[in-house]
Image (tube, rainbow, N blue to C red):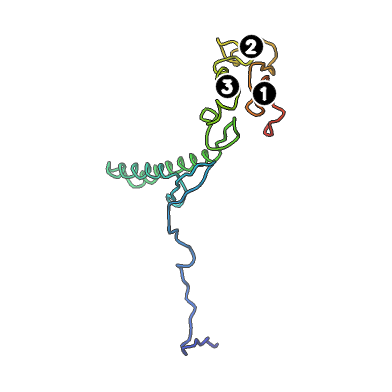
Amino acid sequence: MQQKVSNAGQPSKKKKDKKGRKKPINDNSFQLIINTKEVQLIRYDGFPIMKKDAERLEQLKKSMIQKGIPKSEVQRTMKLERRRAEKALARLKREVCYNCRKGGHNLSDCPDLKSNIPGAGAADGVCFKCGSTEHRQFECKVQKGDKEFRFATCFICKEAGHIARQCPDNPKG
């Protein structure tokens, strides 16, 4: 067997460098744009969660340690709470408004709800089937047909007479 000789005249040996296998993450915090909103994320135990949730988890961990709770119980609770924070982030990514079809907010928080839908303010608390202000369409006793919503305004096409699930323009059916 021959060994390779380097330029300096010394035999070179192959070393297993364990540091090169896994790259450490230099910065734990980063920003992500979710549905036109910038959200500050932090890697907590290697998983991305929102910064406010990470701060809450740190406070929880400190308080549990101060109370003298066993380490195994603290770890179990922290894992559970971290998973809740991960699910909250996933829900935020999936959140879509039924009015403007943009993400990041619900229908009730839509910035252009009142401005774009004609009669949106008048439709609050009105039965979409019979027009009564005494009840909603779910409690309506008038049997004109389950598919008729004459007093409703569609969120998709902004026309009166049907709701979004019946809209011919609704790509999501």
- Residue denoted by label 3: 120
**Residue identified by numbered label 1:** 159
Residue furthest to the front in view is 115
Q: Position of residue 66 (x, y in %)?
A: 27, 43
- Whole-Å distance between the Cαs marked 2 and 1? 17 Å
Q: Does residue 139 sit above or below 166 in this rendering?
A: above
Query: In the image, is 128 to the left or to the right of 15?
Result: right
| SS at badge 2 | loop
Which label sits on residue 130? Answer: 2
Query: Could you tell whether 152 is left or right of 35 in the image?
Result: right
Number of labels in the image equals 3
Residue drawn at the location 56% of the way across and 11% of the way down: 133
Three-letter amino acid code at the position of disc 3:
Ala
| Residue 67 x, y percent position in the rendering | 27, 41
Pointer 2 local density, CA inside 10 Å: few below 14, some 14–19, many at least 20: many
Please tell me which of labels 1 and 3 falls first in the chain: 3
Closest to the camera, between mark 2 and mark 1, is: 1
- Residue 49: x and y, percent? 45, 45
Circles 1 and 3 in contact, beta carbons < 8 Å: no
Q: Amino acid at mark 1?
A: Glu
Mark with earlier residue (2, 3): 3
Mark 2 → mark 3, Cα distance in angstroms: 17 Å
Residue at 49% x, 88% y is 7
Q: Nearer the viewer, residue 35 or 62?
A: 35
Q: Mark 3 Cα within 10 Å, few/some/many (few <14, many 20+)?
A: some
**Please, what secondary structure does the residue beneath circle 3 have?**
loop
**Screen quadrant of the C terminus:** top right
Going from N to C along the chain, the mark reached first, 2 or 1, is 2
Tell me if label 2 and label 3 are in contact, CB under 8 Å. no
Tell me which amino acid carries mark 2.
Cys
